[in-house]
Amino acid sequence: MSEKIKQIAKRIKELRKISGLSVEAVAGEPLNPEVYNQFLQLTGLKLMEGYGQTECTVALATYPWVTPKPGSMGKPSPGNVRRILPRQETDQLGLA
C-alpha cells in the first residue's frame, strides 16, 4: 500500500471526527473489490457505488439500506425499472 493512500486515509479519518462523515460515495464504474476492502480497512467507511448520467438522477446505486457488494454498482433507483435486452431486441431498436 502506498504512502499516499495511507496519508489520504489518515485525512479522511480526521475529517470523519470533525464532520460525522459516515458514508463515502463513488461512481463511474464498478470499483475493484481490493480497493474497496483497503479503503474500508484504513478508514472504517463503506464505499457506496452508483451509476447514472451526469445530467440525470442516479440509475443504479448502493443506497444506505443496501449492503455494499464490492464491484457492483448497486440496485435500480426506487421507481425505476431496468432490464437487459436480448441482442435481437436491441438490433430492432437500433441500439446495437
Image: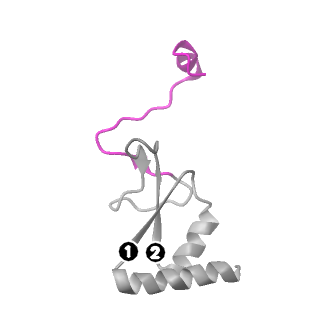
Q: Which residue sits furthest left?
A: 79
> Which residue is pictured at 57% across the width and 51% down the height?
29
Q: Are marks 2 and 1 in contact (CB under 8 Å)?
A: yes
Q: How many badges with numbers are in the image?
A: 2
How far apart marks 2 and 1 lie (CA) works out to: 6 Å
> Which residue is pictured at 43% across the width and 82% down the height?
15
In the figure, is residue 58 to the left or right of 35?
left
| Residue 78 placement: quadrant | top left
At label 2, the amino acid type is Leu
Q: Secondary structure at mark 1?
A: loop
Mark 2 nearby-residue class (10 Å; few <14, some 14–19, many ≥20): many
| Residue 80 placement: quadrant | top left
Report if residue 61 lies within the magenta region: no
> Which residue is pictured at 35% across the width and 45% down the height?
77
Assign the magenta stretch its main secondary structure.
Answer: loop
Q: Which residues are magenta?
A: 73-96
Q: Position of residue 11 (x, y in %)?
A: 52, 83
Q: Secondary structure at mark 2?
A: loop
Residue holding disc 2:
45
Q: Which residue sits furthest right?
A: 2
Q: Earlier in the sequence, mark 2 or mark 1?
A: 1
**Front residue of this view, candidates 15 and 69:** 15
Report if residue 88 lies within the magenta region: yes
